[in-house]
Image: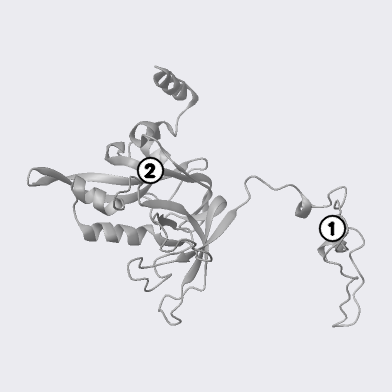
């Protein structure tokens, strides 16, 4: 039906009696035989439905929303629309893991695991955030939850919810985990593992508390976020395109990207032109 009306001409008909609904002949696909060549399509392109793919199109992947990655128990209760979710990097149990969805967990639940582990020294940090004999960081942000399918917060159906996670493009983003509820258009959203050293020491070894936190580039510039607590693990989540989308929500153009040397690079993510020139000179030297 859409193709018949794409030309936006001769698609209005006079109304008849109640219930008299008429439609033109429908042909959802172009006629192609088994041995025929693929047709070239309509020319000129009638509407955006057959236009070239947009680079800012939202790309959504289906993930299994796990609320307890240790026991695979309740699902969906701690994952909501607009939340950043994490995946755990590990080797599959079988050689050919066909048909298995990637599992994701929320930042809130992951921080609960970290808090439960308590203060960590260097050895504890390696054990918790890295797999055995592995130099790769275990937890990585996957994207932002666009919506949740089959949510079962009370575990009535013994089934997993499916989180449709946006890894690129426009998506609503929850501000509940941000230090401030408002954000400027054009601002950048960051996620980082932060480290807060404790005054007490474990047998002379420094211990610290760790936590994943979200913050904005403008908060670094205005001094509301201390870059000295950043570790080597930080990511850009996206750029704000609508700072007041709805209550406790903003719109972000998602694009997860890791940051090299966060403590040095993050302060220059929200700069004026003159300041950026000074930054380029410092990098060149």
Between 113 and 23, which is closer to the camera in this rendering? Answer: 113
Q: Is the N terminus in the top left, top right, bottom left or bottom right quadrant?
A: bottom right
Dot 1 corresponds to which residue? Answer: 6
The furthest residue to the front? 95
Q: Looking at the picture, how far across and down is residue 272, in whole percent?
A: 47, 27
The residue furthest left is 203
Report how many numbered discs are placed on residues in the image.
2
Image marks 1 and 2: residues in contact by CB distance under 8 Å: no
**222 up-or-down from 93: above or below:** above
Q: Secondary structure at mark 2?
A: strand
Regarding mark 1 in the picture, which secondary structure is present there?
loop
Q: Which residue is pictured at 43% across the width and 54% down the height?
A: 175
Relative to 85, residue 150 above or below:
below
Disc number placed over residue 234 in the picture, else none:
2
The residue under the point 42% across, 64% down is 79
Mark nearer the N terminus (1 vs 2): 1
> How far from the left and from the top, in percent, is residue 10?
92, 62
**Is label 1 or label 2 in front?**
2
Q: Residues within 10 Å of mark 2 (few under 14, many from 20)?
A: many
Residue name at image x 42 percent, y 56 percent: 87
* Image position of 216 (left or right of 7): left
Label 1, label 2: how far apart the Cα atoms are: 46 Å
Along the viewing direction, whichever of 219 and 80 lies nearer the viewer: 80
Indicate the quadrant containing the C terminus: top left, top right, bottom left or bottom right. Answer: top left
In depth, the one of 70 and 56 nearer the eye is 70
Residue 219 visible in this rendered orientation of the protein: yes
Colour scheme: one colour
| Percent of width and height locating residue 141 | 43, 52
Q: Is residue 225 visible?
A: no
Mark 1 packing: few (<14 Cα in 10 Å), some, or many (20+)?
some
- Residue 227 is labelled as none
């Amino acid at each position: 039906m859409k193709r018949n009306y794409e030309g936006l001409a001769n698609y209005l008909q006079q109304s008849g009696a109640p219930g008299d609904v008429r439609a033109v002949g429908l042909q959802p696909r172009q006629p192609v035989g088994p041995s025929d060549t693929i047709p070239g399509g309509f020319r000129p392109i009638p509407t955006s439905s057959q236009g070239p793919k947009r680079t800012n199109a939202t790309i959504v992947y289906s993930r299994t929303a796990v609320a307890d990655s240790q026991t695979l128990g309740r699902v969906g209760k701690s994952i909501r629309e607009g939340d950043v979710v994490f995946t755990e990097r590990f080797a599959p149990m079988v050689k050919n893991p066909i048909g298995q969805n990637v599992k994701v967990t929320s930042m809130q639940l992951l921080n609960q695991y970290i808090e439960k582990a308590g203060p960590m020294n260097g050895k504890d940090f390696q054990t918790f955030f890295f797999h055995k004999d592995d130099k790769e960081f275990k937890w990585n942000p996957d994207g932002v939850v666009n919506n949740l399918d089959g949510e079962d917060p009370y575990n009535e159906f013994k089934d997993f919810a499916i989180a449709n996670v946006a890894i690129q493009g426009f998506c609503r983003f929850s501000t509940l985990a941000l230090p401030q509820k408002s954000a400027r258009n054009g601002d950048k959203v960051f996620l980082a593992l932060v480290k807060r050293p404790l005054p007490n020491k474990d047998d002379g070894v420094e211990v610290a508390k760790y936590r994943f936190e979200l913050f904005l580039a403008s908060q670094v510039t205005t001094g509301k976020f201390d870059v000295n607590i950043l570790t080597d693990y930080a990511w850009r989540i996206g750029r704000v395109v609508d700072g007041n989308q709805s209550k406790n929500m903003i719109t972000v153009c998602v694009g997860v990207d890791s940051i090299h040397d966060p403590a040095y690079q993050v302060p220059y993510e929200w700069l004026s032109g003159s300041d950026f020139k000074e930054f380029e000179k410092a990098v060149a030297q």
